[in-house]
Image (spheres, grey):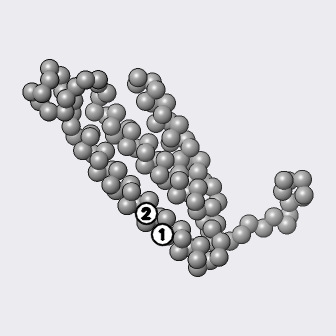
Amino acid sequence: METLFALCVGVLTTCGVFLILRGRTFPVVIGLTLLSYAVNLFLFASGRLSVNSAAVIGASDTYVDPLPQALVLTAIVIGFAMTAFVVILSMRGRGDLGNDHVDGRIPDHSSLSDKERG
């Protein structure tokens, strides 16, 4: 189970970094969201994964640490607010600049041959 969890965190982090390095605003927003999910999973895993354990002492024979669960809930709220803010920023940039490129400039492909353009 730990291997699958670590693999999921790694895949989410890799995809998030790849999308953040793209030149348009929508992939950057999705990349930030994926990185936020990866951090949430990492925080959740820091509380030691266990099955059939209660978060309250005395409710069962074994218990888990409730602090990582509280941190993940806080991170979810902050991540949602950050995503909403970045979406509004990208919409404003699209409206002001007329395109959705990250730096506001349309790349010049005149130096590329027809074969390289695709």
Please name whichever residue, 20 or 57, is drawn nearer the observer in this view of the structure.
57
Image height of 116 relative to 97, above or below: above
Residue that mark 1 sits on: 88
Please name whichever residue, 58 or 7, is drawn nearer the observer in this view of the structure.
58
Name the element at disc 1. Answer: helix
Residue that mark 2 sits on: 84
Q: What residue occupies the far top of the structure in this picture?
A: 61
Q: Which percent across, then down, holds residue 71?
A: 27, 45
Disc marking residue 96: none
Residue at left 56%, top 57%? 28
Position of residue 84 in the picture relative to residue 50 (left or right): right
Quarter of the image where one finds residue 38: top left
Q: What residue type is labelled 1?
A: Ile
Residue at left 65%, top 76%? 98
Residue at left 45%, top 30%? 6
Tell me, yes or no, whether the two marked residues, 1 and 2, touch with CB atoms within 8 Å.
yes
Q: Which percent across, then down, holds residue 55?
A: 19, 33
Q: Which amino acid does label 2 sit on?
A: Ala
Image height of 58 relative to 104, above or below: above
Position of residue 73 in the picture relative to residue 60 (left or right): right
Residue at left 78%, top 67%? 108
Q: Which percent across, then down, holds residue 106?
A: 71, 69
Q: What residue occupies the far left of the structure in this picture?
A: 58
